[in-house]
Amino acid sequence: LTYSVRIKSSKKYFSKLKLSVRKRRNYMTKQVLLTCGAGASSGFMAAAARKAAKKLGADVEVKAKSETEVAGLLPETDLLLVAPHLKYMIDEVKELCETNNVKYDIIPQRVYGSLDGKGLIEFALKQFEAE
């Protein structure tokens, strides 16, 4: 019985810690998550975006994952960008993101199709400016 009480108090502590980290993230590097069906094309897009962010001096970290991995990564994400070919999933994405207080949008086709890293970083920064 004592053991379960300790676990409950630990969970409470870690959830409070998670909230405080989430609040402090406003002053830290913005976390952008790209998603596509299997994570391959968004992986190429993320690599191009990381190079562009470095050149532009943008304080943004870009990761890419498949659509099946998104839900587990939202608590540590500030912006979810969805590949244009997954536009049909936007209602599901909206629900997940609003639950986790995460911004979301669909990557413009011209940016995604040409793997325009600079265009993606500029698009992401505009999403953050809208806060």
Image (tube, rainbow, N blue to C red):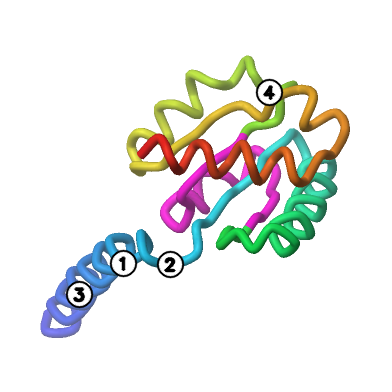
Circle 1: residue type: Arg
Region of the chain picked out in magenta, as a range: 62-81
Q: Quadrant of residue 85?
A: top right
Q: Earlier in the sequence, mark 2 or mark 4?
A: 2
> Alpha-carbon distance for marks 1 and 3?
17 Å
Return the residue at label 2.
28
Q: Which mark is residue 86?
A: 4
| Residue 71 in magenta stretch | yes
**Helix, strand or loop for disc 1:** helix
Q: Does residue 84 lie above or below 47 as drawn?
A: above
Tell me whether circle 1 and circle 2 mark residues in contact (CB < 8 Å): yes
The location of residue 44, given as percent across then percent down, is 84, 48
> Alpha-carbon distance for marks 1 and 4?
31 Å
Q: Quadrant of residue 70?
A: top right
Which of labels 3 and 4 is toward the front? Answer: 4
Q: 10 Å neighbourhood of mark 3: few (<14), some, or many (≥20)?
A: few
Q: Which mark is residue 24?
A: 1
Identify the residue at image location x=80%, y=55%: 47
